[in-house]
Structures are given as structure tokens and as C-alpha cells.
Amino acid sequence: MRNIGRLLPMREHAGEVIENAAVRIESGTVAWLGHERDIKPAPDTPELDANGAVAVPGFVDPHTHLVWAGVRREEFVARLAGEQYDGGGIATTVAATRAASPDELFMLAVGRGRRMIANGTTTVEIKTGYGLTSADELKCLEVIGRLAAELPWGVQATYLGAHVVPPGRDRAEYVDEVIATIPAAAAAGATWVDVFCDEGVFTIDETRAILQAAKDAGFGTRLHAEEIAYTGAAKLAAEMGCASADHLEHVTAEGARAMAAAGVVGVLLPTVTLSLRTFAFGQYQVLRDAGVPLALSTDCNPGTSWCESMPYVVQLACLVYGMPVHEALWSATRGGAAALRLGDVGHLSVGARGDLALLDAEHEADVVARLGAPGCSATVVRGQVWPSPPMPRVNV
Ligand code: NIG
Ligand code: FE
């Protein structure tokens, strides 16, 4: 690809910019990058013109709940009128997801996935968590497997049987069922286990037991932590060696220091704070001061963040946290890769995957400053330009 006005490769540090750049991708992998004047001609290789745009590595979105059926508009409208979120609406989505066939769930999720790729996302983590019986959770993992096969992006599958205790179930029995399902989740393609460890959801002790079982079975672990209230979940993530602790609206300096010492990546989800209208935007400073490596994510889900756009998340992180633009773009690419412990995505270096997002701007700061703009003008996945999908009639 030639005529890149500003290339941000996210190699050693967030601020590296190559002006008037070009990238060569061979067999889906970056073979060369640098100043356009230095590129050697390659006859018979198709050339793309970036028209002077900004290019970043394809976004790595490390926290999504993409597989669901139904909508939660009554809950959203009630929040606009002042209702507080307590996770209770998850049961609405669980009922609709259980009632849906694998084909229906796939059709809904693949539309979301296509729009995410059009927004520049080329690697994504996808959780279960709206089935909440062994059979329904495994059905959702099967759908995640089909999403990985159907679309050209990279997919990491997470088993989140411990999203909430399903209505009508005994807690202790349900925790036992989650643990007993872990081997089947591995066989169905999951490599991560996540728990919603929060006030009114899973306790620290329940979470520890699930994470230990996951680790014993060879899974990587991650946590929904300190979202609704402070419970000490960030410290537990550090104790258990989780790859990431996500949300963190109520993290303390002590929790943040424990995360930094254990190398736990903090995944920030500014669209959730916006959608829940809690205005608890302050945790970025606490985490940054403690030296926690940070990632950004959409948390795409029907309850707290109906968002398919990483450029929007970057914009919001800058505007509400006061994150510097280059740091936000790093967190949306290299940071996401760190949260998923992936080395070959989130940066543009020789040997990395040939994934790029072209931002619809001549300078990266304009992507943040220009409100309501789409952000991403084209996505290159493994060296191929992603065709913008036609708009579906119903956008769910
Ligand atoms: O990441 N916090 C827990 N889980 C999701 C929301 C789930 C829902 O409300 O459907 C989240 O915010
Ligand atoms: Fe989530």
C-alpha cells in the first residue's frame, strides 16, 4: 500500500510516525514498511493507494459479547430516566439467546462482525455468557467457531459461563456446573475463561475457584472487575495471573499497583460508562499512575455497550479520560494484543499480520476531534481490502 500520509506502526512506542509511508504485505504478512521513496518496485503485485490517509495496525478488540439475540431498549430507556444498572437485564438476553437457533445467532453475530471489520477491527475476543446452561454455552461457542471461520479476522474465544447465576438456580450448584463445563468449553474452541466478579454477581471466593479450575485445565484467564462496585477483583486478577482485568471503574490505587506488579493488562471500556450514565470516568489516572498497561475495547453487548466501533472508543477515551491520542491508538491496537497475549497483531513490523485500519483523516488527532464521523475509511485484513458491507435493513 502506497501514499499513506502518516503510518503509526506501534512498534517500540506509541508516538512513532512515518510520513509518506508504504507497506508491503506478502502472503498476509508484513514484508516491508518505511518511507515510500525507499520501496522497491514489485511487478505483478496489486497496489493500493491510501490517498494520504493515516494508517494504524488493525484494531484488536479484547472484550466483546458478540453472540446474543434480542434487544434491551426498555432497559436503556429506563436508564435515561434515571434507573441504575445492576446486571439484572442479562436475564432478558439469556432468555432470547436460549430461544434462538445456532443459525439465528450466527446470522445476528456475523452482521455485527462485518460492521466491526468495516470499522477497522481485525482481531477480536468473543465471550459466551448469554446461554448459562452447559448446552446453551456450548451452542454459543459453536457460533463463535463459525464466526472465526466465516470472517477473515482473528478470533479468541472465551467461556463466560460465570456471567450471572441464572434465575432459579442455586448458586453453589451453578458454580459447580460452570467448573464441570470447562473441559467441554475447551473442546468447543475456548482458550480463555472469564468471570463477572462484582457486587451481586460472583464473589471473590467463587471467582477464585472457577479461575483455578480454568488454569488447571490450561486456560488463560481474564476478569470483569470493579465495574459495579469495588470488591477487590483487580487484586484477585493479579493473584491469579489473569491476562487482563476489564472495566475497573471502581479500581483502587492498591488494586492498580497489584495489577501492574503482576503484569495484568487493564481493559478500559469508555462506552460502558457512557451508556450506563454512571460518569465514573476517573479510573484512567489511577491505572496510569500505577503503571498498568492499558487496552481499549468496545465490550460490544446488548445491555451496557451496543458499540461496534473501535474508532469511537478511541475518541471517547481521549475525550472523557483525557488519554493522549497516540496512547489511545496504542491501547486500541498493541494494548489489545497484550490483553490477549498475542505477539503478531496490534503492530506493523516485518513478520506481523498484514492488518491495517485506514483512518478517515490526514492526521490522527482529527479522528478524535471530528465528532460523529465514521473514523475508519478502509480495512485491510491479511493484505486484502475488506469490502464495505451493504447496510442491512435491521441493524441488530
Ligand atoms: O461487560 N458486566 C457484565 N457484562 C457485560 C454486560 C452484560 C449485559 O448487561 O448484558 C459488560 O458490561
Ligand atoms: Fe463485558
Image (cartoon, rainbow, N blue to C red):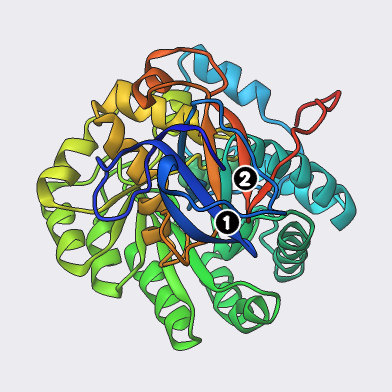
377 or 141, nearer to the observer: 377
Looking at the picture, does residue 276 appear above or below residue 147?
above
Q: Amino acid at mark 1?
A: Ile
Few, some or many residues within 10 Å of mark 2 (<14, 14–19, 20+): many
Frontmost of labels 1 and 2 is: 1
Question: Which residue type does callout 2 highlight?
Answer: Val
Q: Position of residue 47 (x, y in %)?
A: 65, 43
Relative horizontal placement of residue 305, taking residue 113 as reference (left or right): left
Whether residue 128 appears in this view of the structure is no
User: Looking at the image, which residue is at 46% across and 65% down?
Assistant: 344
Q: Dot 2 corresponds to which residue?
A: 380
- Quick one: quadrant of the C terminus? top right
Left or right of residue 73: residue 356: left
In this orientation, does residue 381 appear? yes
Is residue 291 positioned above or below 82 on the image? below
Question: Do labels 1 and 2 touch, CB within 8 Å?
Answer: yes
Identify the residue shown where x is 40% and y is 80%.
Answer: 212
Classify mark 1: residues with Cα within 10 Å, few (<14), some (14-19) or many (20+): many
Instruction: Please identify the quadrant where the N terminus is shown.
Output: top right
Tell me what residue is drawn at x 60 percent, y 37 percent: 89
- Residue 353 screen position, x and y as percent: 53, 60
Q: Which residue is mark 1?
A: 25
Could you say whether the residue bearing mark 1 is in a helix, strand or loop?
Answer: strand
Mark 1 or 2, nearer chain start:
1
Q: Is residue 279 above or below residue 268?
A: above
Residue 280 spot, x, y in % from top left: 29, 29
State the residue at coordinates (41%, 63%).
222
Q: Where is residue 311 shown, x and y percent of the image?
A: 48, 31
Depth check, front residue: 336 or 30: 30
